[in-house]
Image: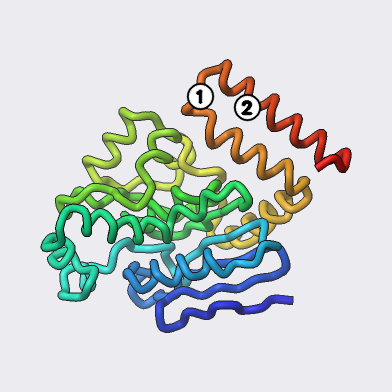
Amino acid sequence: MTTSVTPGSEAGVRYEQDGPVATVTLNRPDVLNAQTPAMWSELVDISRKMPGEVRVVIVQGAGRSFSAGLDLSVARGEGDSSLPVLARLSPEECADRIAGFQEAFTWLRRPSLVTIAAVQGHAIGAGFQLALNCDMRILADDARFSMAEVTLGLVPDLGGTKRLTELVGPSRALEICVTGRRIAADEADRIGLATAVVPRDQLDGAVSDLAAAVLTADVGAVAEIKALLAGAPGRSYDEQDRAEREAQTRRLRDLAGME
């Protein structure tokens, strides 16, 4: 049974849950799901209210594109979170405001969740970073990534730079960020940005199949594996070996009913 917990229609985000699978949909198709601070606030609210039974989160965009990035009409306006207003804050206040924006993206990295971005059409700037914060990215063959913040004189600041560097290496990550160029689905697949690329009409099915495969695995093992892999780039071999030993010990004790 599918239930809608947080419709978020006014904010432009829709939340649906079917048992252990939650689907978060950016729902402003008329503007290619351009993102606003109101949408980010809704994403944070969804993350805080999400039931503990959820194991897989699918992030998608309604219509023909995943997300065209930041809504520039909002960014250039005079709202509380517009770029001119942010610029007038103290450095500490500005950083705190951005930290609140980042929370809308970074919760997708929780060890207790496996998160999947279903990407079609454009995923630009904030859209690209939203996909990067997910554990896996299934791309339609018409998908296009771009880290376009540099075209506004800005830097990517929504949790995407570390994952991008881990996936493609520092040299290519720099090239992607400073040029803001478009990356087609076939290149994304070749350089490690895509988990898989499928024909557009097979995107929903491919994502559903992946979610079902994740759900067949032991929930505790999945959480431990995600944490092990997430921490691996920052550990030495000896430190990673130790983390594996400790994780396996926890799994053995849990499976034996000792914890």
Q: Quadrant of residue 105?
A: bottom left
Of callouts 1 and 2, the N-terminal one? 1
The amino acid type found where label 1 is placed reads: Arg
* Picture residue at 67% right of the left edge, 57% below the top: 55
Q: In the figure, is residue 86 to the left or right of 250?
A: left
Q: Residues within 10 Å of mark 2 (few under 14, many from 20)?
A: some
Q: What element carries label 2?
A: helix
Residue 164 image point, x, y percent: 39, 39
Residue that extends furthest to the right in the rendered view of this protein:
256
Q: Quadrant of the N terminus?
A: bottom right
Q: In this view, does 188 lie to the left or right of 259?
A: left
Residue 228 to residue 33: above or below: above
Residue at numbered disc 1:
235
The vertical placement of 104 against 235, above or below, is below
Q: Where is residue 83 in the image (x, y as percent from the top left)?
A: 17, 64
Q: Position of residue 108 (x, y in %)?
A: 51, 54
Which mark is drawn over residue 243?
2
Tell me the residue at 49%/55% (across/down).
107
